Amino acid sequence: MPEPVAAPFRAPVPSDARSWDMARSEQLADSAVAGRVLADLADGDERIAVLTADLKFSNRTVDFERRHPERFLNVGIAEQHMVTMAAGMATFGYVPYVATFASFVGLLCAEQLRTDLAYPGLPVRVLAHHAGISLGFYGTSHHATEDLGLLRAMANMTVVCPCDAASVEQALRTTVDHDGPIYFRLGRGRDPQVYAAGAPGFEVGRIATLRAGGDLTIVANGITVSAALQAAEQLAADGIEAAVLDAHTVRPFDAETLCAAAAGSGRLLVAEEHNVVGGLASACADALVDGGIGDVRLARVGMPPDEYALIGPPTHLYRHYGLDADGLAARARDLLEQR
């Protein structure tokens, strides 16, 4: 069982302008490690190449460019073309990594992801960063709250949602030779630490149990994992023991671990930076039904099913939608009161 780090949430306070500063994102995004990790891997693997759509500073793929400029391509604002280019490169033996905002690659490029990558099963890795509502002020066109629903439905597509720098690194290092395409749903590079650096235990397709507890189970991934751990600490102070699961792989989904935890606690709270329809909560509900697990109450915390996210600082939005520790703890207490 991986050991989470007892680390406080270090995101800027809501009034701090750095919370949404894109101009200085390279300096601020200290957990955007993909560029550096891929550069390390590329030192000994000539197949690895990186493409980005004019966002090398926002996603820090510039770290790869500085060390391997001959295998770095900035295609400009041409996301669909970038995915198709990567597919072509994969047919010649490369393992390409494409990087841009999740709202662009996960939604705008849905056809290319399906037809050019998933259908032929090509080993292209998608770094879909600034997922969910993490772009805050940039508005609905830059929010990605439907991408998991789309990607979960694509045959041959692996979908992974790491929660911090350490888990991003482990996910990248352990999947270089993974069959078929992978959609890595990433944050904005200012994500709180959950795992110790270099900690083993990350396995695609397996839920990680970060905390044991028999009163209820909190399932989270991405940015919500840290909030779930903090919420569990608040609940423990009131004598409520909550298990916390990091469901970092949404497809293929670890139904066995999920069902065992749900059956043990009888209460399942799912927190996701996504519409509550189609994403992690839906994967959990599917697992419970398919597994014949009855008498489990499930509550969903995320974007309302028939609304688009408000526009504002990410920290304000997380609090508004109950995706912070206080919100999750309050929803957990409500769930426990239900009979």
Image (spheres, grey):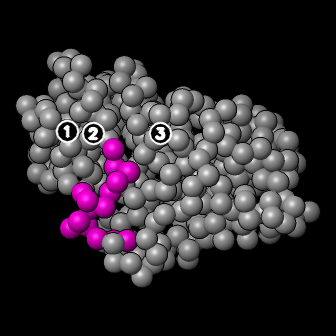
- Magenta stretch bounds: 19-33
In the image, farthest residue toward the left: 70
Residue type at mark 3: give it.
Ala
Q: Which residue is mark 1?
A: 64
Left or right of 158 on screen, residue 87: left
Name the image quarter holding the C terminus: bottom right
Residue type at mark 1: give it.
Phe
Residue 217 image position (x, y, % from top left): 76, 50
Residue 210 image position (x, y, % from top left): 67, 43
Give the crowd class for mark 2: few <14, some 14-19, many >=20 residues within 10 Å.
some
Give the crowd class for mark 3: few <14, some 14-19, many >=20 residues within 10 Å.
some
Q: Nearer the viewer, mark 2 or mark 3?
A: 3
- Nearer to the camera, 328 or 252: 328
- Nearer to the camera, 298 or 249: 249
Residue 165 image position (x, y, % from top left): 42, 45
Q: CA distance from mark 1 to mark 2?
A: 6 Å
User: What residue lies at 66% left-to-right and 71% top-to-bottom?
Assistant: 326
User: What residue lies at 74% left-to-right and 65% top-to-bottom?
Assistant: 234
Q: CA distance from mark 2 to mark 3?
A: 14 Å
Quadrant of the image occupied by residue 104: bottom left
Give the crowd class for mark 1: few <14, some 14-19, many >=20 residues within 10 Å.
many
Q: Is residue 169 above or below residue 313?
A: above
Q: CA distance from mark 3 to mark 1?
A: 20 Å
Main SS category, magenta section: loop
Q: Which residue is mark 3?
A: 197
User: What secondary structure is found at the residue carrying circle 2?
Assistant: helix
Q: Which residue is mark 2?
A: 36
Q: Are marks 1 and 2 in contact (CB under 8 Å)?
A: yes
Name the image quarter holding the N terminus: top right
